[in-house]
Amino acid sequence: MKKSRYTDAQIMGILRQADSGVPVASLCREHGMSAASFYKWRAKYGGMDASMMCRLKELEDENRRLKRMYADLSIQTEIVKDALQKKW
């Protein structure tokens, strides 16, 4: 997955600036980002604080790891089933 150019603290700062009334267009110009990125962050992280944001990223990483483990195990199971069928 592509690493973000902005840290969690920077994203939270940008979102707080927008909440305080700074126009989105000027925020985007100031920080060198697109409006789509801002709205994506607001949809994903709106109403969160830094600790909740960190916990969300930890859970996403754990979920990604578990999905990979499941995929590996299912492949192994298919290989064993195929080997047993060919043996008989």
Image (cartoon, rainbow, N blue to C red):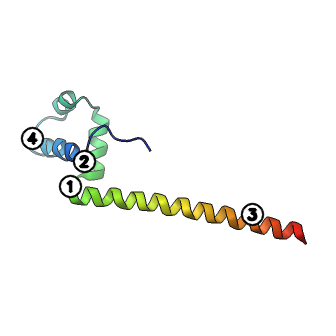
Relative to 7, residue 32 above or below: above
Would you say the residues marked 4 and 2 are in contact, meaning their CB atoms lie under 8 Å apart? no
Q: Residue placed farthest to the right in the image?
A: 88
Label 4: few (<14), some or many (≥20) within 10 Å? few
**Which residue is disc 2 drawn over?**
8
Q: Amino acid at mark 1?
A: Ala
Q: Amino acid at mark 3?
A: Ile
Which quadrant of the rendered structure holds the N terminus?
Answer: top left
Q: Report the Cα–Cα distance between label 1 and label 3.
A: 44 Å
| Residue 21's disc number | 4
Would you say the residues marked 2 and 1 are in contact, meaning their CB atoms lie under 8 Å apart? yes
Indicate which disc, 4 or 3, sits on the residue closer to the N terminus: 4
The structure residue drawn at horizontal position 22% and vertical position 44%, both measured from the top left corner, is 11
Q: Secondary structure at mark 2?
A: helix
Q: Is residue 25 left or right of residue 54?
A: left
Can residue 48 be seen here? The reply is no
Q: Is residue 1 left or right of residue 87?
A: left
